[in-house]
Image (tube, rainbow, N blue to C red):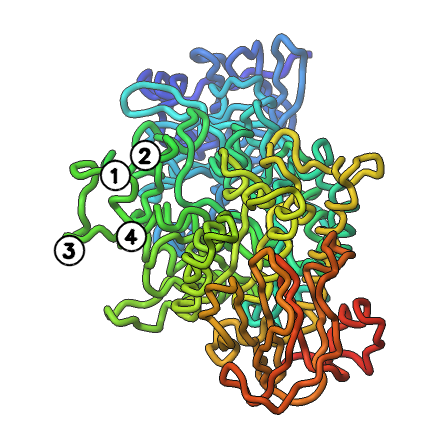
Amino acid sequence: MDPPVLQLSPARPSADEVARLLAGRHHDPHAVLGAHPGKSGVAVRVLRPGADAVVLETEVGRMALSWADDGLFTGLLPTGWRADYRLRVTDGNGERVEEDGYRFAPTLGELDLHLIGEGRHEQLWKALGSHPRTVDGVLGTAFAVWAPNAVGVRLVGDFNFWDGTGFPMRSLGSTGIWELFVPGVGEGARYKYEIATRDGRLLQKADPLARRAEAPPATASVVHDSPYVWGDARWLRHRAEHCAQAGAMSIYELHLASWRPGLTYRQLAVELPEYLRELNFTHVEFMPVLEHPFGGSWGYQVSGFYAPTARLGSPDDFKFLVDALHQAGLGVIMDWVPAHFPKDDFALARFDGEPLYEPADPRRAEHPDWGTLTFDYGRTEVRNFLVANAVYWCEEFHIDGLRVDAVASMLYLDYSRQDGEWAPNQFGGRENLDAVAFLQEMNATVYRRCPGVVTIAEESTAWDGVTRPTDSLGHDGSGGLGFGLKWNMGWMHDSLRYFAREPIHRQYHHNELTFSMVYAYSENYVLPISHDEVVHGKGALVSKMPGDWWQQRANHRAYLGFMWAHPGKQLLFMGQEFAQGAEWDHEQGPQWWLLDEGWPAAEDHRGVRRLVTDLNQVYQDCPPLWQLDADPAGFAWLDADAAQDNVYCFVRRDAAGRSLVAVSNLSPSVRTGYRIGLPAAGVWQVVLDTDDSRYGGAGSGRPGPHQAEELPWQGQPFSAELTLPPLATVWLCPQGPELPLTAARLTGARPAGPVPEAG
C-alpha cells in the first residue's frame, strides 16, 4: 500500500529561492530545507535532484512528499509531530534510506566562531575542515570552510557523484564560515567545495584544512579521522624538560620521497631510524611533507597545509614514522613553508573568487622568484590559519622542530623586486611589518603550547634579532622574531668559497674562515650544508673541492671536521655523509651503489661515512662542542692568523671548564713539530683525526699521547708539538675519565668511565 501524500506546505519557497538553491547561490539553505514548525504544522522540504520519489519515515509511519519544483519535495506534518525523521529516496540507483542533513543545528559553537573571528583559534583544524562525528545519534561528517566572498558554497564528492546541487552549505553570518553536516559520510570520502563567486563562476576547491588529500595528480580532499595511538610518551617528556638549542644537535636533512625511492612512510620507519642511529645523528630534518601538486618543487609549493603528502601513505602512516624515530631517540624537524603557495586552480589561490589568502595588492601578492603567491599576513584569519598550522604539526604529529623556509622573502617588501614593483609600509620602510607580527605570534604560540619544540629560521640577511625573544627589545626598540635557531648562511657561503680554492691561494683568503666568529654570537646558529648547496649546477660537497680524488676527499673530511668543531649546530644533506660526487636528483635520490662491495671506490665512500659516524659520536660525548654554542665563553682562537700555513687553531669549552682543541691544516703539506697552545697541563689525546686511514686518509698524524709542556704559547699557559696531517682537521682532549668514547676506538685506550652529563 502506498504511503499517504502529505499536503503541500502553504509556506512554499519563492521561485527566486528555489532558483538560488539550484544554482548554488543561497546563503542559508537550512532556512528553506529541513523541518520548519509553523502554525499550520511542520513544513518539510527536501532537495533531491534526480529523485523520482521521497518518502518521510517518522515514528508514526511513512508519508510521501510532493514534488514541487526541480528536485524540491515538500510536505506538511501535522502540528505537534516531532521533526526527527528519515528519508526513503527512490531514483535511478534504486531505493535507499538516508538522514536529512538539513534538520541538524550548526556543528560549530559560538566559542569557535568567536575565536575564529578574533584570529585566536589555536586549534583551528578542530573547527574547520571535515570531521566525522555523531550528531543526535546520527553518524556523519561535519564540513566547514572559510569563504567570506562566496555567494554560495556546495559540497561535492564521491558520495554525491560530484554533483553538489543537493548539498548546499549555510553561511554562519559575518564570520565567513560555511557549514554542513552530512549524515552517512565518513572516513575516506573524497570531496571538494563548489564555490559560487560574485562574478558568476563556480569553482571547485580542495579543503584548505583537509587533514588528508588524494595522492597527486588527483586533487580532492579526503575525510580523515585518526585512530592512531602514540608510543613516544617518554620522548615527549624528555623533550619538554630540555631546551633543544642548548643541547647537542646534529641534523641529517633528507627528502623523504627520494631517500629510498619507492619506500612508504611505514617502510621508512624501519630503515631510517636504523640508519640514523648507525651514523649517530641526533635529529632528522624532512624537506616539506605537506601535500604539494608538483613533485619537482620538492614540497616547497604547498597545496595542502594540513595534510602530509599521500605519495608515501596516510597521515597515520606518517605518524608511525615519527613515532618510530622518537622511540629510536631521534628528534624530527620538518620544513614548513608559510612564505608562499602555488597558483593551482584547485587550491588556495583566489579561493572564493577573490584574493583571500593572498593580498589584494599584486605588488605584495606575487612572489617574483617562484611564480607563486604570498600570504596576506595582515589578515586576521590568514594569520590564524598559519599560526594554527604550525601548532597542528607539533601537537598532532609530535614534530620536534619547524624549519621555516624563505624567511627573508617574508620580511622585506622589496625582496627580489625592482623599484616601482613594491609599496612601502606605513612608515615608508621596506620591512613587511605584518610578516614580522605573524612570525612573532607563531613563535610565541608554538613555544607556549609545545614545550621543547624548536623553531629554526632560514633567513639570509642581517635582520636583527631573528633568535631574540619577542619580548626582548633590540637597539631599535622592537622585539625579536622569537626563533630558537637560525641557519648561518654567511658561514656556509664563506666556508664553501674558501674550500673551493686551490690550497696555494687559500692564504690570501684566510679571513673567509675566521670572519664567522665576528658575528657568531649575534644569533643562535645552525651551520647548514643543505639541499640548496648540492643542486642546480653547484655540485656535491666533495665535487666542490679542488685537486684529485684523494685531495677532494681529504678536503671534504677536513671541512666536516672544521664544521663540527665550529660553534653552532650542524646540518648535513643526504648523500654528503658518504661523499657522493653527483648532485642530488629528486627522482633518483642518493647514489647508494657507491657503497656496494662491487664498486671500486666503495671503501673511499665508506671511509667518509665512518668519519661522520665518529664526528657525531665525539660531538655528543664532548659538551665543549655544544654546551656553550651561544656563549662567547665557549670559544677562543689559539691562532687565527696563520694564513701562510693555512692553519686554524681554536679551543672550545663547556660550563665546567673542560676543553677541546681543534686544529685544521688546510694545506697539502704535512707540518711536523707544529706547536700549539693548550689551556691545561697533563696528557692530551687526539680524539679525532680526519686523516685517519679508517676514513680513507694517509694516517700522517700522531694520535699521541701528547704531554703538555709548561711553555706558554698562543696565549695559553701550556703547549705541545704536533704533526699536522695534510688537508685535515684534528681534535684533542685532555686524557682522563672524560675522554670521548671515540678516542678509545682510535687509540685502543679504554675510558675510565662514562662522560658526565652536561649541565
Can see residue 716? Answer: yes
Name the front one of labels 3 and 2.
2
Query: Which image quarter: residue 256?
Result: top right
- Residue 634 spot, x, y in % from top left: 52, 78
Mark seen at residue 434 = 4
Please give the residue where the numbered disc 3 appears in the rendered image: 427
- Residue 146 spot, x, y in % from top left: 40, 39
Decide which of tag 2 and tag 1 comes sooner along the chain. 2
- Which residue is found at the position 66% from the left and 85% from the top? 708
Secondary structure, mark 1, is: loop
Please state the total of marks drawn on the protein image.
4
**Left or right of residue 65: residue 693:** right
- Which residue is found at the position 37% from the left and 60% from the top? 440
Q: In the image, what residue type sits under mark 2?
A: Pro
Gap in angstroms between the C-alphas marked 2 and 1: 7 Å
Marks 4 and 2 close (CB-CB < 8 Å): no
Gap in angstroms between the C-alphas marked 3 and 2: 24 Å
Q: Is residue 83 above or below residue 624?
A: above
Decide which of tag 3 and tag 1 comes sooner along the chain. 1
